[in-house]
Amino acid sequence: MNRSDASRKSSFDRLMSVFCREDAHVPRLAPVLAVLAVTACARAPDSGSGAARVALGEVFKTDVVVTLGEDPQDSIATPGSFAERATEGFLLSDGQLPRIRSYREDGRLDAAFGRFGEGPFEFQRINGLAETASGEVAVLDSRQIRLTYLTGDLEPDTIAQLPGVPSGIEPMGDDLLVGLMLATERSPDASRLLQRPRLLHRLADNRVAWSAYTYPFVPIERPYWASLVRFSFDVAGDSIYMASSLRYPVAILSTAGDSVGEIGVPSSTFLPVPVFEPGALAPNNLTPLPNLLGGHSTISQMAVVGSHLIVVHGRFGSEVGFTEYHSSLDIYDRHTGGKLYEDVPLPENSRVLGGGRHLYVLQDTRFPPWRIAKLSFQEEDPG
C-alpha cells in the first residue's frame, strides 16, 4: 500500500468514526461533512429485533482503500458488475461501456477486454460477472441473451446461448447459478400476468440442471411491481440466499435448489414500496412517479462475508427514473439467522460492490478517481 492509499484509508476510517462521537463539534465542520455526519450517525427507534444500531466504523475496519488503475486510452465510464477472484484481485465491468477489467489486489489494472457489437465476443449490455472453478471469466450479456467465457487473462474462449434473459450470476462449485426467466415459461399473451415462473437456475456444462425460486407474486395482482422488482442472490457453502427487492424475507435454498428456510426481518425504518392501484402510474396521473417512489426502501443487494450475510438496503431517489441509492446495511449471522446489526448507515453516494474476503465499497459513485474501500469486521470472523 503506497502513501496516498494509506492516507485515503485513514481518511475513510475517520469519516466512519469521528462523526459519531458524542463530543463531536459538527458545526465547525464543512457543510458537506456535516450532512454526512447526520446521515451516518442517525439512530432510528429500536424495531424490537434486538439488533444493535451503530455507525459503520463500529462494525467494520478499513483494511485498505485502493484506486482503480486506468489506461489513459481506455478510461472507466462508471464501475459496473463486480466479482472477487478466487486467489487475489477482482473483476469489474464498465457500467456504461462493453468492457471487462481485471485488477490486482492493490487496484492495479491487469487486463481489459470488450467491444460493442453483435458478433462473437462482442457485448451490448454486460449485467453480470463470475470467475468459474477453472479460473475462466463468465460474462452475462442481457441483450444478446448469452454467456461469454474468457480465459483468466481475459482472452476469448467460448460462447454459450442462454435459454432466457439473464440477470445475475454466481459460481457454485463447478457450476454456475444464473438468474433468468426461461423462454419456455414466458407467455406472449395476457396469461403471463397470472404466471409465477422460476427465476434461479443452476447451469452444469451450460445446461439447466435445476430451476428454483418461484416468482414471489402474481403480476396482475400487483400492478407495476414487475417493472420495479429486481432479484439478487449470493452463495456461501451449501446455502443460496435470494431476495426480491420489494419485500422481505430472504429465501434460503440448498445447492439442490430446495427451499430450506428464510432469514431477515425489516427494520422499523424500512419503508416498503406500496401495492399500487391500476392506473396509479398512468401518464395522466397528477402525482409524478418520483414522488410516488421517492424515499421508499428496497433490498438492493446481498453479500456474504465470512459467517455474515449482509443485506444492502436502497432508497429510490426523487429524480426521474428508477434510480436506487445504497443507504444502509442489515447484518445477520447466517448460521443462526440472528440479526446482529440493523440500519448501519453507508456514506452518502457510496455503493456496495460485493462480498467475499472483504466487503467492497465504492466510495463515490459520481466521479473518478474510482476508489474502493475493502472492509472487514472489527471482531474476528471465524468464517
Image (cartoon, grey):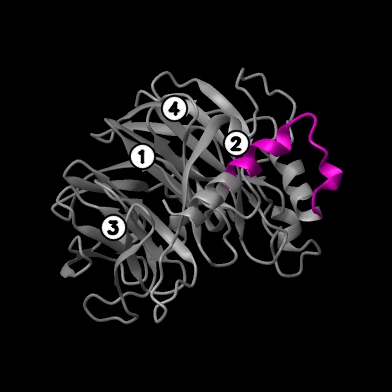
Nearest the eye: 285 or 60: 60
Left or right: residue 183 compared with residue 64 = left
Residue 289 spot, x, y in % from top left: 71, 61
User: How far apart in space, not on screen, are marks 4 and 1 (Cα)?
Assistant: 24 Å
Image quarter of residue 27? top right
User: How far apart in space, not on screen, are marks 1 and 3 (Cα)?
Assistant: 38 Å
- Crowdedness near tag 2: few (<14), some (14–19) or many (≥20) residues, C-alpha within 10 Å: many
Viewer-nearest of discs 4 and 2: 2
Looking at the image, the residue that sits furthest to the front is 3
Work out whether mark 3 precedes mark 2 in sequence or the reverse, and give the earlier one.
2
Residue 46 spot, x, y in % from top left: 71, 23
Q: Amino acid at mark 2?
A: Leu
Q: Main secondary structure of the magenta part?
A: helix
User: How far apart in space, not on screen, are marks 1 and 2 (Cα)?
Assistant: 18 Å
User: How far apart in space, not on screen, are marks 4 and 2 (Cα)?
Assistant: 26 Å
- For label 3, the residue is 184
Residue depicted at x 60% and y 64%: 366
Work out whether mark 1 precedes mark 3 in sequence or the reverse, and give the earlier one.
3
- For label 1, the residue is 357
- For label 2, the residue is 56
- Crowdedness near tag 4: few (<14), some (14–19) or many (≥20) residues, C-alpha within 10 Å: some
Q: Amino acid at mark 4?
A: Glu
Viewer-nearest of discs 3 and 2: 2
Badge 3 element? helix
